[in-house]
Amino acid sequence: MADCGEEVLLTGRIKGRVKLECSRCLEDTWQQLDVEDLPQLSSVAGIIDIEDELRQLLVLNIPTVVLCKDECKGLCAVCGKNRNITPCECSLETYDPRWKKLRQITKKAIK
């Protein structure tokens, strides 16, 4: 047990898999997690509580953008179907109706 106020250098590695949600299709996916930079901690009354420090370290090492696979197609913006499983026939072409007259003019000019 360390004396009060001593610095303790914690060494080690946290390695494992975490279940996360794909950022595009929202399906569950497993990601590898490998953390080597463990913090230097101070003891209080001879007790070292590392639970909160390790939790924060793990949370900070979770990727911000998680993909189930690099070529994930995501969800359809119109009907909400997972495009990896079911291709949809929705038209993703949308435009501002205020530009309708200009679209008509440019279509006539192209012909």
Image (cartoon, rainbow, N blue to C red):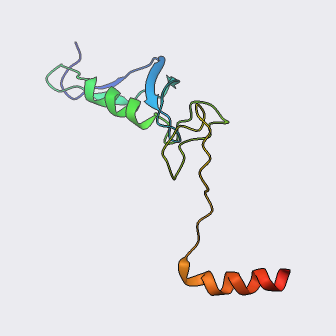
Q: Position of residue 50 (x, y in %)?
A: 28, 23
Number of callouts: 0
- Please determine whether, in this image, residue 32 is positioned above or below residue 109: above
Q: Nearer the viewer, residue 55 or 84?
A: 84
The N terminus lies in quadrant: top left
Residue furthest top as drawn? 1
Is 25 positioned to the left or the right of 99 in the image? Answer: left
Lateral position of residue 79 relative to residue 47, left or right: right
Residue most toward the left?
45
Taking 41 as reference, is 107 above or below it? below
Relative height, residue 3 to residue 74 (above, below)? above
**As rendered, which of 96 and 2 lies closer to the eye?**
96
Would residue 13 be visible to someone looking at this image?
no
Residue 72 position by quadrant: top right
Question: Which residue is drawn at the image coordinates 18% and 25% (left, top)?
Answer: 4
Residue at figure coordinates x 55%, y 76% from the top left: 96
Compare residues 69 and 65 and report the one nearer the observer.
69
Picture layout, residue 89 above or below residue 57: below
Quadrant of res 45: top left
- Foreground residue, 12 or 95? 95
Q: Position of residue 52 (x, y in %)?
A: 26, 29
Quadrant (top left, top right, bottom left, bottom right) of the C terminus:
bottom right
State the image coordinates of residue 93 (x, y, percent, origin top left).
63, 62
Place of residue 15 in the rendered image (x, y in percent of width and height, measured from the top left): 48, 17
In screen coordinates, is 48 left or right of 80? left
Observer able to see residue 19: yes
